[in-house]
Image: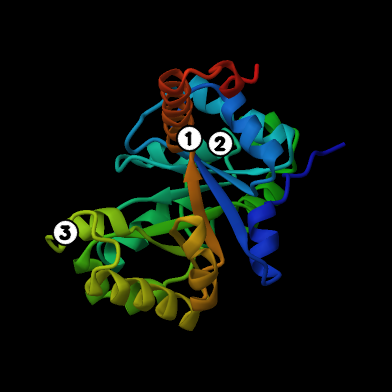
Amino acid sequence: MTVSMKPSLVLQKLRSGENVACFKVNLADARVVEIAALAGFDCIWLDQEHIGQDWSILAAQIWAAKSQNKDTLVRVCRGSYSDYVKPLEMDATGIMVPHVMNVADARKVVGMTRFHPLGMRAIDGGNADGAYTAADFKQYLKDANQQRFVILQIEDPEALEGLEDIARLEGYDMLFFGPGDFSQAIGAPGEMNHPEIVSARKKVVEVALKYGKFAGTTGTPDKVQAYQSMGYQFISIGADVIALTQYCKGLLTGFKDEEQNGGPADQYYKG
């Protein structure tokens, strides 16, 4: 009896015209991933570009998401092909490659991350994504191309110049606009409402949809509806470190307020 690759929830929803909610996890504990999955997020974003978790930690986080039938997106570090395929072999549902600058860059990514006939990804089949060789070999290659997503991150002004060439390339699924690094590149760090960022965000989604690609970005909850109206189906709307930081600050503010007013502080702790 052969084992089939678990279908991607993200791709299922995107291909059906539905929206996807993503949550970014910076902390190493797999229980954080499970909490976000239990909360109902479709996809958990794990980051190897800025964090670089040990591979065993990444594997545990992927398992935690799979236990709740949720997808994982791993933003890889820019490196060799093995940096790109290892998360996929651990059965991450997708990867995102940062700072894609031009079509040659994009074509290289596709070549390293897709199996024949789309690319020449290195083949193993003995890892989690291939059910440790329990999957039918040819079906495994087909499923990996169809049920695992590849995202190209557009976060530099230079990439906009050849965006149409990048978008018409076959073999990947989504263009993802990253406003943070883009703001720095235009000399306006952190100015998310800068006219050039507004224009770039609009251009990325328009070009993505023109060539049959999905569009993703980051955004605060108050921006979700506006971005979805633009055509962004995939939005990352929060992160564990943001939530924990704000929660801790709120607790301490409440504690100090009550302390100054002479009231009980223990109401702010529920544990």
x and y, in percent, of residue 249 in the image:
41, 29
Disc 2: CA contacts within 10 A as few (<14), some (14-19) or many (>=20) = many
Label 2 with label 1: CB-CB less than 8 Å: yes
User: Marks 2 and 3: in contact by CB < 8 Å?
Assistant: no
Q: Quadrant of the N terminus?
A: top right
Residue 25 visible in the shown view: yes
Depth check: give the residue in front, 154 or 143: 154
Of callouts 3 and 1, which one flags the residue occurring earlier in the amino acid sequence? 1
Amino acid type assigned to the residue bearing label 1 in the image: Lys
Residue 126 in sight from this viewpoint:
no
Comparing labels 3 and 2, the label whose residue is closer to the camera = 3
Kind of element beneath mark 3 = helix
Instruction: Provide the residue designation for mark 1.
Output: 86
How far is disc 3 from disc 1 in space, using C-alphas? 30 Å
Furthest toward the front, the residue is 262
Query: Which of 124 and 238 lies nearest the eye of the viewer?
Result: 238
The answer to the question of whether label 3 and label 1 lie on touching residues, with beta carbons closer than 8 A, is no
